Image (cartoon, rainbow, N blue to C red):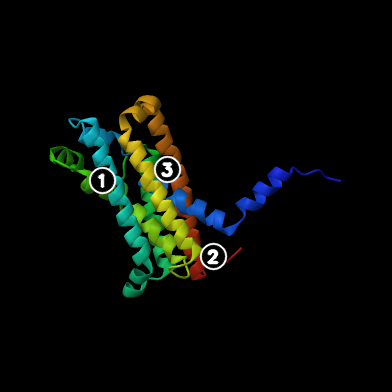
């Protein structure tokens, strides 16, 4: 008789549950692309002359903007697909390409041009309030995060399906964590250090590249180019 650990069996069964697998996929893909840790240096530069209260207010506005933008694309995703006649496989391949480019930049511990272009930081520093632009969009809710949300929404049968709840929950949790990280950006950088942040960004980049390749495979499988396993 082979003895099995009940806790290990229960965990294995839970991890195979569709709702858990999809929720983890949604949370990881959205959070890795928003990546508030990589935005810390730019955020601190933008708010260099701001007092702690104003810095928190700007972080809150940026996180709220990120939540509103990603939620809007999540809710309107199916309509956008129908309006422009875009198929899910086409968007999976296009989204995978964007994710791959962002992931490769993250592997080098640098911000992707899709999230932060040259001059954004300098322009934001001169602004009275940069919480919405460029912090909320495109630094947090950039093309990569929007593409990821759209690919996830393309897999949802109806607007009221549980998968939509998982996507919206992942967006809300990501926005909340982004606020916590940016509101305490000074302390986070002090605790983790520049090296720690770069290591974390590289790990996220590696996982993002793997996720991008999975999107490619899914798109090619849906097109019938790659046989289903």
Q: What is the CA distance from the residue labelled 1 to the residue labelled 2?
A: 44 Å
At a point 14% along the width and 41% down the height, the residue shown is 127
Residue 137: % across, % down: 26, 50
Residue 183: % across, % down: 31, 36
Quarter location, residue 58: top left
Image quarter (top left, top right, bottom left or bottom right) of the C terminus: bottom right
Seen in the image, is 227 located left or right of residue 152?
right
Discs 3, 1 touching: Cβ within 8 Å: no
* Residue that mark 2 sits on: 226
* Residue that mark 3 sits on: 205
Seen in the image, is 178 located left or right of residue 12?
left
Q: Earlier in the sequence, mark 3 or mark 1?
A: 1
Residue 109: % across, % down: 36, 36
Task: Residue 169: tell me if it is visible.
Answer: yes
Task: Residue 37: tell me if it is visible.
Answer: no
Question: Label 3: few (<14), some or many (≥20) within 10 Å?
Answer: many
Seen in the image, is 123 located left or right of residue 100?
left
Q: Earlier in the sequence, mark 1 or mark 2?
A: 1
At a point 58% along the width and 59% down the height, the residue shown is 18
Please tell me whether mark 3 sits on a helix, a strand or a loop.
helix
At a point 46% along the width and 48% down the height, the residue shown is 28
Question: Label 2: few (<14), some or many (≥20) within 10 Å?
Answer: few
Quarter location, residue 193: top left
* In this view, the mark in front (3 or 1): 1
At a point 62% along the width and 54% down the height, the residue shown is 16
Seen in the image, is 229 located left or right of residue 224?
right
Residue 140: % across, % down: 31, 47
Please tell me whether mark 1 sits on a helix, a strand or a loop.
helix
* In this view, the mark in front (1 or 2): 1
* Residue that mark 1 sits on: 61
Discs 2, 3 touching: Cβ within 8 Å: no
């Amino acid at each position: 008789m082979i003895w099995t650990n009940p806790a290990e069996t229960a965990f294995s069964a839970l991890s195979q549950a569709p709702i858990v697998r999809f929720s983890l996929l949604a949370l990881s893909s959205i959070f890795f692309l928003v990546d508030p840790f990589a935005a810390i240096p730019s955020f601190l530069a933008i708010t260099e002359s701001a007092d702690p209260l104003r810095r928190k207010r700007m972080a809150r506005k940026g996180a709220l903007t990120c939540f509103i933008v990603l939620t809007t694309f999540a809710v309107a995703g199916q309509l956008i697909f129908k309006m422009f006649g875009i198929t899910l496989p086409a968007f999976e391949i296009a989204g995978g390409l964007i994710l791959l480019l962002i992931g490769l930049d993250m592997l080098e511990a640098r911000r992707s041009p899709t999230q932060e272009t040259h001059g954004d930081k300098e322009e934001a520093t001169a602004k009275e309030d940069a919480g919405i632009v460029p912090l909320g969009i495109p630094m947090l809710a950039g093309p990569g995060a929007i593409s990821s949300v759209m690919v996830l929404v393309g897999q949802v049968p109806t607007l009221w399906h549980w998968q939509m709840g998982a996507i919206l929950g992942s967006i809300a949790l990501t926005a909340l964590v982004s606020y916590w990280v940016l509101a305490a950006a000074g302390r986070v950088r002090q605790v983790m250090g520049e090296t720690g942040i770069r290591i974390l960004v590289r790990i996220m980049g590696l996982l993002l590249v793997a996720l991008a390749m999975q999107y490619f495979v899914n798109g090619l499988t849906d097109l019938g180019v790659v046989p289903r396993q």
